[in-house]
Image (cartoon, rainbow, N blue to C red):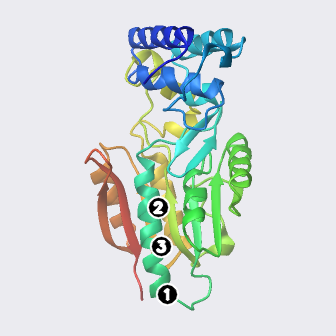
Amino acid sequence: MRWNSPELASLIDDARRRFTHAGIASPDVDATVIAAALLGESSRLALRFYSPDQIPASFAVAYEAAVKRREKREPLQHIVGSAPFGILDLRVGPGVFIPRPETEVLAEWAVTEFEKLSEEYEGQPDESIIVDLGTGSGALAIYIDQRVQADEVIGVDLSPVAVEAAMDNAHEHGSAVRIIEGDMTDPDLLSEYSGRVAMVVSNPPYVPFAPQEAGLLDPEVYHDPETAVFSGEDGMDAIRGLIPVAARLLMPGGLLGIEHDDSTAAVTRELVEKQGCFEHVRNLKDLTGRDRFVTASKVQP
């Protein structure tokens, strides 16, 4: 990358060194993305050619403040105010779970499989309802809604802060997703939709609880809301609770996709199988080749 402004180049190089010293995994990317966000660039990884007189006088002070925040391991997405998710750029902030790239695999699975399902059940009523349990920023729900022709897409989250953020993101992206506040493990959740839903997807909390002082997780993780990350001592509380909810909601032949920790692939699959109403229960790998999702379809009579 060429820099016309020595000051800009120097600031970004200094940030890279500081981020490396702080243990940040992607110092080059983070230093550039922060600069691009402050300069109003639409492409945050490819800054255009700047001359010195094009750099705002306030840039250096604002950049230093942002770099200090990142040095303290505040998530990059909180600093720039948004997170990429496939075709989307979603607003995030404190109290809202930051969508991760691995979840894009589940989103693409949902799009592909829903299109197949729609062809199979063409003409039947209520065939195109999709529910996203634990929607957070609205990532899965909005992504799927943008890619398929569904009658209704519903995102559910327990957090009022997340619900508001998901509504804002849906509005910004022109999505008609319905966002509601609710508990994904509530046996009565969306009771009016029982047996009518074509697909349930979920990126639930699935990390075994680990106190920050234990040092087992990256510091950035602890900036996400605890209820969106941690799920009991073994990380399985939410998954145990949502499987029967999904089983009740899904119509015969309806599809289920659940993200889980890479260490709980076997137990998640076993829980789905033990529910007794699912078939074609399979593991799905993430982009690194690790089992990260379980998919299944509800048994047809």
Which quadrant does the N terminus fall into?
Answer: top left
CB atoms at circles 3 and 1 under 8 Å apart? no
Against 73, is 41 above or below? below
Q: Please state if 164 lies on the left or on the right of 270 as rendered.
A: right
Q: Please state if 260 lies on the left or on the right of 151 as rendered.
A: left
Q: In the image, which is nearer the foreground, mark 2 or mark 3? A: 3
Task: Report crowding for label 1: few under 14, some 14 to 19, many 20 or more residues within 10 A (C-alpha).
Answer: some
Q: Which residue is mark 1?
A: 121
Q: Which residue is mark 3?
A: 114
Q: Which residue is mark 2?
A: 243
Q: Residue at x 61, y 9 (%)?
A: 64
Q: Nearer the viewer, residue 226 or 289?
A: 289
Identity of the amino acid at label 1? Tyr
Identity of the amino acid at label 2? Ile
Q: Secondary structure at mark 3?
A: helix
User: Percent x, y for residue 116?
Assistant: 43, 78
Residue 253 visible? The answer is: no
Against 185, is 131 above or below? below
Which quadrant does the C terminus fall into?
Answer: bottom left
Q: Secondary structure at mark 2?
A: helix
Q: Nearer the viewer, residue 229 or 286?
A: 286
Against 154, is 162 above or below? above
Which quadrant of the structure image shows residue 256? bottom left
